[in-house]
Image (cartoon, grey):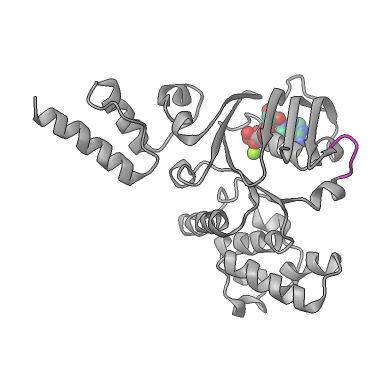
């Protein structure tokens, strides 16, 4: 059974003529890593807020179809019930910080669910380790941290709750280049060592393509593509036409392929792009 199932889902925010999303059919299986891409205002945040029940519960608007998360129809269950299974990380780490120290931030949710001291300690160590936050940061106030560190603490505080599903909506978009790289590294670590379902809206496709099981393209309120990375990136022109800019090595190899110099798959990593280019160029030499 999928952990998330959307059937003919649509949402129109109150006061808007346009549907922010319409006709969305998709399911996410336990343990999948799903990447969501699309231009600004295409409906990506609306999609992920529908997956944690914030839509329709905390927004005014008109809903169509249904979203079922861990067997709960989001029209019938409060966000608090759904939030026990779904952790959510926003773009802006500031917006989710509530506490005076890193420790309070990570421990807060754990105390709320009534875990004992040993379990709390174990989870704090585990989640900080996963998020690459040294233990001696526990006493630090959030304002002493860099943007990337703040976002990693925010992620740790969600991980500590061990949600079966974790959704991150552009977790790197407010960060400087170093912070972006740090957060991507945490996503990589999560993929490696945490068997949760991970759903991430993220523009850094060169970093996500090797991690994801699936890419979803949202465009103008519709899901236009939903496929494994190899297939998703196979038609680079389609993505470019719909406001998505794939990593340059992919675009380059796609051009070589159009010129008839290469006929293999589109590369997902720089290494693969280099071997694809080698193959194309060695073919040229033989002519
Ligand atoms: P994305 O995350 O891809 O940038 P959003 O899901 O935020 O897109 O937005 C989809 C559409 O819904 C946009 O046209 C946006 O202006 C509109 N929208 C988003 N949030 C609200 C809101 N709270 N009230 C009214 N319209 C909204
Ligand atoms: Mg958004």
Q: Residue at x 15, y 34 (%)?
A: 282
Is the C terminus in the top left, top right, bottom left or bottom right quadrant? top left
Q: For the view shown, which residue lies furthest in the front direction?
A: 1
Q: How many marks?
A: 0
Q: Is residue 263 left or right of residue 80?
A: left
List x then y, in percent, for residue 167. 67, 47
List x then y, in percent, for residue 270. 33, 45
Q: Nearer the viewer, residue 96 or 155?
A: 155
Q: Is residue 160 left or right of residue 228?
A: right
Per the rendered image, the range of residues in magenta is 73-78
Query: Quadrant for ligand 2?
Result: top right
List x then y, in percent, for residue 45. 68, 38
Q: Residue at x 86, y 50 (%)?
A: 80
Q: Residue at x 32, y 42 (%)?
A: 272
Q: Nearer the viewer, residue 26 or 180?
A: 26
Residue 156 in view (yes/no): yes
Picture quadrant where residue 108 is located: bottom right
Main structural element of the magenta stretch: helix, strand or loop? loop
List x then y, in percent, for residue 252. 31, 32
Q: Is residue 242 left or right of residue 258?
A: right
Picture quadrant where residue 162 is located: bottom right
Check if residue 77 falls in the magenta segment: yes
Residue 101 in view (yes/no): no
Q: Residue at x 72, y 76 (%)?
A: 121
Is the N terminus in the top left, top right, bottom left or bottom right quadrant? top right
Q: Is residue 250 above or below residue 170?
A: above
């Amino acid at each position: 059974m999928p952990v998330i199932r959307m059937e003919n889902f649509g949402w129109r925010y109150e006061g808007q003529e346009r549907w922010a999303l319409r006709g969305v059919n998709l399911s996410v299986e336990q343990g999948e890593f799903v990447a969501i891409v699309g231009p600004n205002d295409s409906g990506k945040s609306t999609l992920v807020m529908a997956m944690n029940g914030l839509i329709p519960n905390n927004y005014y608007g008109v809903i169509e179809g249904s979203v079922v998360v861990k067997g709960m129809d989001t029209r019938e269950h409060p966000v608090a019930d759904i939030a026990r299974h779904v952790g959510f990380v926003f773009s802006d780490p500031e917006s989710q910080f509530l506490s005076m120290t890193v420790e309070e931030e990570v421990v807060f949710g754990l105390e709320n669910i009534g875990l004992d001291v040993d379990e709390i300690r174990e989870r704090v160590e585990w989640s900080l380790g996963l998020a690459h936050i040294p233990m001696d940061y526990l006493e630090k106030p959030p304002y002493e941290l860099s943007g990337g560190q703040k976002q990693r603490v925010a992620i740790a505080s969600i991980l500590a709750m061990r949600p079966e599903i974790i959704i991150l909506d552009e977790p790197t978009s407010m960060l400087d280049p170093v912070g972006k790289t740090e957060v991507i590294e945490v996503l990589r670590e999560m993929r490696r060592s945490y068997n949760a379902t991970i759903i991430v809206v993220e523009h850094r496709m060169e970093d996500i393509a090797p991690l994801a099981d699936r890419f979803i393209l949202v465009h103008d309120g519709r899901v236009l593509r939903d496929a494994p990375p190899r297939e998703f990136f196979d038609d680079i022109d389609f993505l470019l036409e719909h406001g998505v800019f794939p990593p340059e090595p992919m675009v380059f190899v796609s051009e070589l392929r159009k010129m008839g110099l290469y006929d293999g798959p589109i590369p997902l990593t720089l290494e693969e792009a280099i071997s694809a280019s080698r193959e194309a160029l060695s073919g040229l030499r033989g002519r």
